[in-house]
Image (spheres, rainbow, N blue to C red):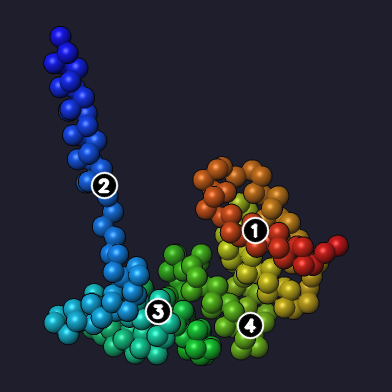
């Protein structure tokens, strides 16, 4: 009488356990507690197999670890042959150059991927606009920020635009940007709110600083 029930329980337990093992993410605990070990591993892989993929993986790790000069050198070494205009590498170079305050290089590199659709809302586009600002091209910088300004989207770039306006001492314009963001938050779905909550929190903080 109880055998079918016991068999079902055993089956369910084994299936749940098996699925949990399958779905368990493959986390490199050594890299988590010792980021240098990841870089060492990638360096060894590159020595063993010098490929475009291995170069970029190591360059990305250098960039994440703050070893900017090494990242720039390796990214540039990767831009050869069929990969001479690789979008990922060029976008990462924009980030790396900005970190080193090499704004002319940021602008030059960003222009190579400027016309790609994904550039419009990328971090590279924000850094391109900021590089223009830091180079004294404030009108062009604002034009780029305006290209990233849309309703119910682009919250990160819009927050950066607000900061640009603050730096230009245009506090009322910045306040309007932040207020628009927070007004739109009320009409977003729960997923969109969670995804962009950092920008809403930052906008609230800037409004608090601006005051009335």
Residue that numbered label 4 is attached to: 133
> Contact (CB < 8 A) between labels 2 and 3?
no
Q: Name the residue rendered at 40%, 79% in the picture.
A: 65
Q: Earlier in the sequence, mark 4 or mark 1?
A: 4
Q: Any mark on residue 201, and which?
A: 1
The secondary element bearing badge 1 is classed as helix
Q: Is residue 91 left or right of residue 172?
A: left
Residue 76: give x, y in percent of width and height: 33, 87
Q: Is residue 184 left or right of residue 102?
A: right
Name the quadrant containing residue 26: bottom left
Q: How far apart in space, not on screen, are marks 4 and 2 (Cα)?
A: 46 Å
Q: Earlier in the sequence, mark 4 or mark 2?
A: 2
> Contact (CB < 8 A) between labels 3 and 4?
no
The secondary element bearing badge 2 is classed as helix
Residue 47: give x, y in percent of width and height: 17, 85
Q: How far apart in space, not on screen, are marks 4 and 1 (Cα)?
A: 25 Å
Q: Residues within 10 Å of mark 4 (few under 14, many from 20)?
A: some
């Amino acid at each position: 009488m109880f055998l079918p029930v016991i068999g079902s329980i055993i089956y369910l337990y084994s299936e749940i356990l098996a699925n949990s093992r399958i779905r368990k993410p493959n986390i490199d605990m050594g890299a988590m507690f010792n980021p240098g070990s990841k870089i060492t591993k990638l360096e060894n892989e590159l020595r063993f197999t010098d490929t475009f993929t291995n170069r970029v993986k190591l360059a990305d790790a250098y960039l994440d670890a703050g070893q900017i000069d090494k990242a720039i050198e390796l990214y540039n070494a990767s831009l050869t042959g069929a990969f001479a205009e690789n979008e990922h590498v060029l976008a990462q170079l924009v980030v790396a150059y900005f970190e080193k305050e090499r704004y002319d290089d940021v602008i030059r590199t960003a222009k190579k991927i400027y016309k790609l659709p994904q550039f419009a809302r990328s971090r590279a586009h924000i850094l391109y606009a900021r590089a223009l600002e830091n180079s004294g091209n404030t009108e062009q910088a604002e034009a780029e920020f305006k290209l990233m300004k849309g309703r119910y989207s682009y919250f990160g770039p819009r927050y950066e635009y607000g900061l640009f306006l603050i730096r230009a001492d245009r506090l009322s314009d910045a306040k309007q940007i932040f207020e628009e963001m927070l007004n739109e938050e009320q009409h977003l779905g729960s997923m969109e709110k969670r995804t962009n909550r950092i920008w809403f929190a930052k906008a609230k903080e800037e409004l608090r600083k601006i005051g009335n």
